[in-house]
Image (spheres, rainbow, N blue to C red):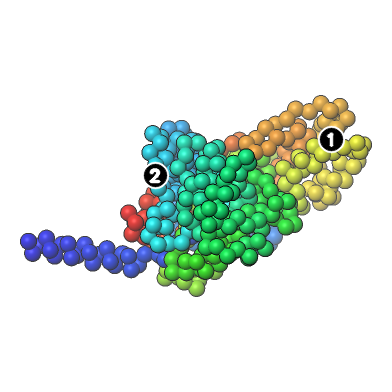
Amino acid sequence: MKIKSILSLLVACISISAMANAPKYVFYFIGDGMGMGHIIATETYKRVALGDNTPLLMMQFPVSSIVQTYPAIEPITDSAAAGTALSTGYKTMNGMLGVTPDTTHVYSVAAQLKEKGYGVGILTSVAPDDATPAAFYAHQPSRKMYYEIGKDAAASGYEFIGGSMLRGTKDTDLLKVLADSNVTVAHGMEQLANATTRRVILLNPEDHYRGQIGYTVDSIKGALNLPDMTRACLDHMLKTSPDRFFMMVEGGNIDYAGHSNDGGAVIKEVINFNEAIAVAYEFYLAHPDETLIIVSADHDTGGMIIGHSHSGYSGWIRNIKHQNISKDSFGDLCKSLLMSRRIFTWEDMKELLADRLGFWSKFKIPADAEEALQEKFEDTFSGRNSKEEKTLYQSFNEFTVLVFKTMDAATGIDWTTTGHSGNPVPLFSIGVGADEFKTVHNNIEIPQTIRRLTGIE
């Protein structure tokens, strides 16, 4: 009897000690589609193009690991299954959110920490009802059930949700559901500053309403950006839940750019994501004994690599410096030119390519590549004879595809797919309990480890 009492007391003491050492502030960063190829390309770009030898902040964290991403059955995951694994610790089928393959509800660490008294902020550079952010609050058999996902957001009780747009509001009462839940929907930072409710949803200004907030490389005036959103969410957490909070921040545009096979956009999105991490790191420096930061990814998009059959050991990734337009925006520009009455000549296009991508003006384009570009331009703009290449989020005419393949040839970047790959992704961590992630090698282990550290297991 005495032995049992002593053991019970010992267990209680260990539990109390663990709770005392639990992180009060948890930052969970997810680079959507961010494989090691994306990170190394960005590291290389910083070094050779910007003259900056300092590693990306995430790569300076003391703990690093490699994480497998496969879903319940298939070898390659989508964002819904990966988001569910990263948020709940359970594998599920592609396309499913917050449920197991038999549709049993499983709960995210965010929801469980909310029940424990933590404030919760969920934000992304794409739509907050998209797969990864939604996996932290929704329970739906399909990631496309935007109205139902929006209702789950209203019911979550989370203090802050942010992203580009809500897709479940068309011809529904979702905005009323949110208002009845005392949630302020703010379009842009100015409206956010005027919000008086405890719960807010931050979206892009209405004149920038789209599936993602806008690429960093496009420098869209007035659009949201991830570092500022991260800072706004942190400020809101400190105002509403200063004692303890959980924040999930997704760099969703990395995935968008990866699906488009746009190396320049990927690199500048990873840099932007790194700047968002820096917001949390600054907070960590002020609260090192209370803060945990985890950085990982849901999957690899595009199979991005440095080096192709023509680059040898060289590579010219410095040429990315001259790209100031995304492939998506360039494709949209070409479509608008095709629809206009203006006669757009090859010389006009050469001038545009020189200005927006650096062709000829900043680096040489081989004669055979220029000839191929001109031939495809004439076929597309004069002959109106161009097929479309569809990716997950966009559709590009053949001329746009060739332009960015030419850019790849000029930078040394290559791709294996416009979809996802089964490659593992990185994990980096710093702060209270970071050492526990040294042996994490499967995505479901990340939330399981967070549970142990915060005492919600």
Side of 399 where 265 appears, left or right: left
Q: What's the amino acid at mark 2?
A: Val
Mark 2, secondary structure of its residue: loop
Is residue 87 visible to us here? yes
Side of 78 where 22 appears, left or right: left
Residue 365 rendering spot, x and y as whole percentages? 81, 42
Depth check, mark 1 against mark 2: the one in front is: 2
Q: Earlier in the sequence, mark 1 or mark 2?
A: 2
The C terminus is located in which quarter? bottom left
Q: What's the amino acid at mark 1?
A: Leu
How many other residues sit within 10 Å of disc 2, few (<14), some (14-19) or many (≥20)? some
Task: Say which mark, if any, is on residue 106.
Answer: 2
Seen in the picture, residue 172 relative to 222 is either above or below; the reply is: above
Residue 74 rendering spot, x and y as whole percentages? 46, 32
Side of 287 where 189 appears, left or right: right
Separation of residues labelled 1 and 2 (CA atoms): 49 Å
Seen in the picture, residue 426 relative to 12 is either above or below; the reply is: above
Of residues 152 and 279, the one drawn nearer to the viewer in this rendering: 152
Is residue 263 visible to us here? no
Of residues 89 and 45, the one drawn nearer to the viewer in this rendering: 89
The answer to whether mark 1 and mark 2 are in CB contact below 8 A is: no
Q: Which residue is mark 1?
A: 338
- Residue at the spot 87% in from the left edge and 37% down from the top edge: 340
Q: Quadrant of residue 379?
A: top right
